[in-house]
Image (spheres, rainbow, N blue to C red):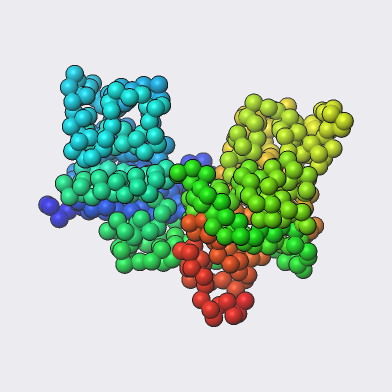
Amino acid sequence: MTSEPLLQIQRLSKGFPGVVANRDVSFDVARSSMHALLGENGAGKSTLVKMIYGVMRPDDGGMRFDGEPYAPARPAEARRAGIGMVFQHFSLFEALTVIENIALGLPPSESSDDLEHRIRAKSAEYGLRIDPERRVDDLSVGEKQRVEIIRCLLQEPRLLIMDEPTSVLTPQEAERLFDILERLRERGCSILYISHKLEEIRAHCDAATILRRGEVVASCDPRQETAGSLAAMMIGNHLAVRQRQRNESGEVRLRVKDLSLPAPSEFGVALAGVSFDVRAGEILGIGGVAGNGQTELVEALTGERRSRPDAVMIGATSAGALGPVRRRRLGMAFVPEERLGHGAAAGLSLAENTLLAGRAERGLVHNGFLHVLRAAGFARDIIDRFRVAAAGEGAAAGSLSGGNLQKFVVGREILQSPEVLIIAQPTWGVDAGSAADIHEALGALAAQGTAIVVISQDLDELMQLSDRFAALNAGRLTPARETTTLTIEDIGLMLGGAEAAPATEDAA
């Protein structure tokens, strides 16, 4: 009985309208093990752990926990069975104290008068220093994570699910977390660990299951793998064929030279010596496992973070020290990863949202006066050209679905016919037909002479769109390579931070 897996996943499937999140997923989590769950964004990891934790119910398949059938209808049932989960985004009330937050997550029978004593005892046992009387809004991010962990530990879990636990931690806090997880494993607890940091997986996990498009595609001992080989498993064994006819290279429209910036916070990624050129009519694709500096690079390119003047050149103009508005005047447009709140203001109408980014390029403002009718016409043009499902140009941006808002934001930037376009995750959350429309529009824009930088975690998308490809790893960018010369092995090496093999480089 002791050799039987603690958790058995048996052909779990879960679908949503228009998408299959998980299909026939099967794997085992051994007792006293640290088991990694790997996959690109959208691979089905979050849906899977939500079914394990009782947040969602599977459409098909089943589970066994500790040798018994297991089908939680809600998280409380999972906790009673001995499963705890620490979500990537903490579920804490900022205005309440630590002890009040922990009490909310415990059954009434366990929220007794001795709860403060139990919190302090558990904190001391695992080295999780925390004051139960402090308000959560006074805590650091690392301390907030400790609160979530203590809440789980008070229920003596036999399986602890950790979703991207170190994405918000300093390196020192991450090391302390791994010390705690190792002590838990020594005491018989298993950990199901989701992370995009491949070196963490290699260093601390003794088994890994890799998901791709909702299916299990590989299992391995990550200690016997490299970061590149793990990335290659996540990518798959095929490359999409670039469908766009490449234009002849024109003049350099965007030049980035030795762009180095410190991490924006203790949880961010520093950029180190990033350099590349993009010519008129060219699409440069930049990929990488999430959390390797993509957000920081976008901010540096668009002017949300400033650098030395000549680190970013738009045409012949030094733009590194300029903000977003000045860069737009030089012919740059951009689509951020976060569409609501960053790409569009939720409470404003679609017509009003065109004024945020297109007032100069589309002549929507003249001598300080807004051309409201012209803005409305621009919004209608976007809605028609990109098939945005909206109740007209007066609809609030926040009323649109995620996919339709993405189409609107992308369309707003493309229809300005910029000299340079920076676009992050262009088709995140849109259906296949809309994704094809966006790809076609980007290809047409490049054909008109725009220099485009596409930053995406969808490698198929990058291979279809891009003339050249580079990869970010820990804030460093590999040399850009012609996409038509790349193999899966090359891409795996690049995602892992290495350059491709010399023979392939010669072929390029």
Q: Residue lying furthest left in this view?
A: 1
Q: How many numbered marks are there?
A: 0
Please, is residue 110 above or below residue 274 in the view? above
Q: Residue at x 38, y 49 (%)?
A: 171
Q: Residue at x 73, y 30 (%)?
A: 352
Please, is residue 313 above or below residue 94 in the view? below
**Residue 284 shown left or right of residue 366 in the figure:** left
- At which x and y percent is residue 31? 20, 51
- At which x and y percent is residue 44? 43, 48
Q: Residue lying furthest front in this view?
A: 308
Q: Nearer the viewer, residue 306 or 353?
A: 306
Q: Residue at x 66, y 56 (%)?
A: 311
- At which x and y percent is residue 208? 33, 57
* Residue 479 showing in the rendered view: yes
- At which x and y percent is residue 246? 72, 66
When asked about the image quadrant of residue 254, the answer is bottom right
